[in-house]
Image: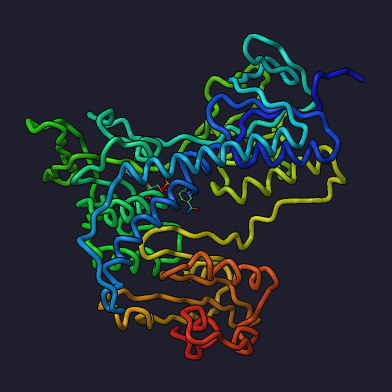
Amino acid sequence: MAQYDYDLFTIGAGSGGVRASRHAAALGARVAVAEERYLGGTCVNVGCIPKKLFSYAAHYGEDIAHAAGYGWSSAARAFDWRTLLANKDREIERLNGVYERLLRGAGVTLLRARAALIDAHTVEVDGRRISARHILVATGGWPVVPPIPGAELAISSNEAFHMDALPRRVLVVGGGYIAVEFASIFNGLGVDTTLIYRGERLLKGFDADLGGFLAGEMENKGVHIRLRSDIERIERTAHAGALRATLAQGGELEADGVMYATGRAPNTRGLGLEYAGVNLAANGAIVVDANFQSNVPSIHAVGDVIDRVLLTPVALAEGMVVAERLFGSGGRSMDYEYIPTAIFSNPNIGTVGWSEAKARERAGDIDVYRTTFGALRHQLTGSGEKVLMKLVVDRASGRVLGVHMVGPDAGEIIQGFAVALKCGATKSQFDATIGIHPTIAEEFVTMREAAG
Ligand code: NDP
């Protein structure tokens, strides 16, 4: 049997790579990880974590205003971007350290350098060749900005986390997760925000009620939303720092910043995958089977680089499957059904399971329960913010197929319902569950009248 330097060599110390490496090491494998950029990958450095911190920051402005209805008064509200940036950076540095300690504590060799494949069992790091029985590619993805004239004047979410100053006016392009989250963040921090989306309705692919309802709530909070719109080109204007965006549909918009949130592409360029003969999809994603094995048996891939479900907890679960399969009992497999997800827009979205449209297509006869209401909290704040809650139920079996929500802490609420859906909960079991009063979440167990 060939002797290798390591049992597993992981390229990329993001969510999936770190989890797989740590678990493989715990199972007794000799593991090395190479990371050229930052420990923790997109999620920790330019994704979930700093985004959620920014989202909290944006909510505070609103909370301070709302507190007046509860008798609190404060001096004029003032927001300091530099304070937020510095505190956010400090927290991320702490998390980078946590990741490093976790890896080293697990006995994983950490190489702070770029790695590229030479062949099916060899990588090159800093001019040194290292052999491994298995190689795991977990290099994530990178934001895509369409190549329009002036695209270089725009930023992506990567840069939005490090802007020297907040723009006074911003255009956010896209209608997915990042676009609605950042439009909400900018707006909440006091930036005059316009969201530009080429489609009819935000959040394509989600239950149709979510995007429409969210758009209304975001507009009520001050975000300008332009649907069926796209930017054709971006230019500088005569005013220092200002940009002019010409819309394909006619008309121009001026802003001090343009941020694209138009999807992400798998990070596979320059990795030497071609030397090992690894098959890639047209968009550069590594093609893997149900066990995350590529066409080259010694090479696996997990996370955003395989372009299945671009979510941190999914990458973690995929990483566990690979480690178990290669070094454990191998019994674990990945289940993509009922993955809950939250969008940290303002208001938040939480969702698990099938949309109404998907349920009609696949299950046929369904019942839909839907309610919208103003939360108790806002009876004193004067805010007109509304909550949307929706259940999609299979009529024959009574099984709840989808739980969807737009409203405060939707992610926190939906996590528990995701467990129920995984267990195959039925509408009558929801009905038999006692609510917690007074909460928003109790509505999910008190919806009695099907809307259709
Ligand atoms: P999404 O795929 O969610 O959305 C991309 C958006 O950009 C879509 O509205 C799409 O329009 C639009 N778009 C794509 N190409 C163009 C183009 N050339 N011109 C104009 N518009 C375009 O990607 P994001 O970048 O928002 O996020 C990437 C992924 O990261 C998400 O899918 C999600 O999996 C993950 N993520 C998760 C978060 C969370 O869990 N809270 C937060 C942020 C990201 P159309 O709909 O018409 O195709």
> Quadrant of the rendered structure where residue 109 is?
top right
In the image, is 135 to the left or to the right of 176?
A: right
Residue 394 visible, this angle: yes
Q: Position of residue 262 (x, y in %)?
A: 37, 43
Residue drawn 84% across the image and 45% down it = 330
Nearest the eye: 385 or 281: 385
In the rendered view, tell whether residue 142 sits above or below residue 51.
above
In the image, is 266 to the left or to the right of 179?
A: right
Nearest the eye: 381 or 298: 381
Q: Position of residue 206 (x, y in %)?
A: 45, 61
Q: Quadrant of the N terminus?
A: top right
Residue 295 visible, this angle: no
In the image, is 296 to the left or to the right of 185?
A: right
Residue drawn 44% across the image and 64% down it = 349
In the image, is 287 to the left or to the right of 320?
A: left
Residue drawn 56% across the image and 24% down it = 36
Q: Position of residue 188 (x, y in %)?
A: 29, 57
Nearest the eye: 85 or 31: 85
> Quadrant of the rendered structure where residue 101 is?
top right
User: Which residue lies most toward the right here?
Assistant: 1
